[in-house]
Image (cartoon, helix red, strand yellow):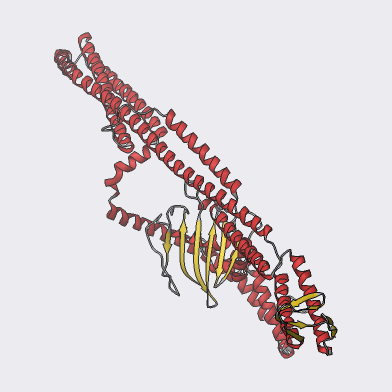
Amino acid sequence: MKLQRMRIEQLRQFRKPFVLDNLQPGLNLIHGPNESGKSTLVRAIRAAFFERYRSTAVDDLRPWGDSAAAPTVELDFEHEGRSWHLTKSFLQRKRCDLKVGTDTYSEDDAEEKLAELLGYQYPKRGASKAEHWGIPGLLWVEQGTGQDIEQAIEHAGDHLKSALNSMVGEVASSGGDDLIETVRSQRDTLLTGTGKPRGDYLKLEKDRAQSELEIEELKERVHKYQEQVDRLGKLAQDYDQAEAERPWEDAQRQLEEARVRYQQVERLEQQQNQEKATLSQLQQNHRLLQQNKEHLEGLSRQLEGRKAELDRAERDLATAEAQTPMIAGRLSEARTAYEQAEKQRKLAGLLQTRQRLEQDVRRLEQQKQVLTQNLAKAKEYHQQLEQARQQARDNRIDSAAVKNLKATANQLNEETIRSRTIATRLSWQLEPNASLTLNNEQLTGQGEQQLLEESTLVIPGVGTLGITPGGEELASTRRKLKTLEDSFAEQLKTLGVTSVEQAEERLSAFESAGRAQKHAEDLLKSVAPAGIEQLVSEQSEAESELAKAKSQLQATPEPDQKENVPALEEAEAAFVQAGTALDKAESDEREHQAKRSALKQARDNAKTE
């Protein structure tokens, strides 16, 4: 089998149609950055072959946040010189169609045809797993599952055993007695009568056990070494990627995106900063008390220096007092900026919420319009279908009976012509006012008539003539003609028509009604594959969702200010920056107050001393 083309739509990140074609025989490489959809393409191929179209365990194919999506996969491939086209839709529009050359299969027939082609089976319920894949499971290795190849071999074991049994049967049926005797002799040299190893086989068993232990140790060492190599490669790759991408230039954006996820952490950090500030103040007070203690111990030696200490404390306190208005002003500015940033953030969030709701309303209105149009078309096609069915009922007639009627009419016509050729011909040409009587029918003027039966001719003033057509052939023809006339009349009565032409017209009308009925059914299925009731249900659901979205939009207040409103990410970043600035200003103000208290304490201590 050679895969040639694939097309996916509404499947994970591929909301719009994506086509991958020009696949060549042999190895095809698909490359791209992370999260570009490479694994999604492989998942789509696996779902097309191994998942049932009506399965409810394929929610991982649905695009995030789109409950109305219908993931669709189309595959074109070649097998045994024939072109195959597979189309499978999941979830909202469950459908499976398979076209093989000029043959088409649908629904379960299509899936059974695929299973027969590839030699696997579908699960009775739930998602498809490795135990259902059979032989294709040996050829299907997903990313990160290469170490599990033994499981795939185990699941394909039954099929492999069947193939091996078939091969052994062929050997046995072709005269393999010598081979069996040779195998039995070699087995006796390796096994005892009870089937236990001996000789070289026993030694090999012991060597194998020892080798298995050594292999396990080597595997463990290889596994650890591979983990170290992978770790080293990952670190080297991360380092090269960091040097190439320079992620620190994008740190601010990442910080803004992470802010929402780490709000709780930030609150804990704020509490920790406050406790650190309190600890710092206590430590500073402790240091001041320690200094005071040392100062008191040296009073006897430093009595002359007390005045100098007092002057220095007065100067330091005056300097700190002079800085108080500036620090208070910074704190006020930081609080004002924080409040403004918080207001802008709330405004941007409200505006983004309204924009999202407006988009939902437009999308649902469009969906409702499409469903309404499809419902109107479905009703129109349903009416056409009923009309075609009524026309078929009104003109129902058996085509074989019409064919027999036409054959009887042709035979009757042929026999009529033949009877005319062998019948007794009577012609007359009479004088004016003269007449004859043939079988109680008056004849005048001139004319001609063919006689198939015994007849009586009356000649006025002369007498009566008896005319008997002769010959067995004429009698046989007359009887056959009578039989055909009776059969033709009975067939007309059975069909309820008066002529062959009327029967052909009714047959033509009946066949035309059948084609119209098939066409109307196809049109109805194209717009309502699950029926009109399902379409009405989908329309009601769309109307309900639309009403809900409109209600949410109406309940969301419209911001008074729309101009010069930044984007939500920008507003969040500004809010974080303002919060950081406010924390810094509050921290500076606390440190300043602590410093003032310490300086006042130092001055008071100096005065007291």
Is 349 or 77 nearer to us in this picture? 77
| Left or right placement of residue 40 versus residue 162 in this view | left
Q: Which residue is drawn at 43% across and 73% down?
A: 24
| Left or right placement of residue 240 versus residue 523 in this view | left
Against 395, residue 84 (above or below) is: below
Q: Residue at x 27, y 29 (%)?
A: 581
- Give how far across and how far down residue 441 sits, in percent: 79, 75
- Give how far across and how far down residue 95 sits, in percent: 57, 57
Q: Quadrant of residue 450?
A: bottom right
Is 455 or 282 nearer to us in this picture? 455
The image shows a total of numbered marks equal to 0
Against 185, residue 197 (above or below) is: above
Is 249 or 606 nearer to us in this picture? 249
Question: Can residue 388 be seen?
Answer: yes
| Left or right placement of residue 198 versus residue 98 in this view | right
| Left or right placement of residue 165 versus residue 234 in this view | right
- Give how far across and how far down residue 113 sits, in percent: 61, 68
Question: Can residue 126 be seen?
Answer: no
Which quadrant holds the C terminus? top left
- Give how far across and how far down residue 133 sits, in percent: 60, 65
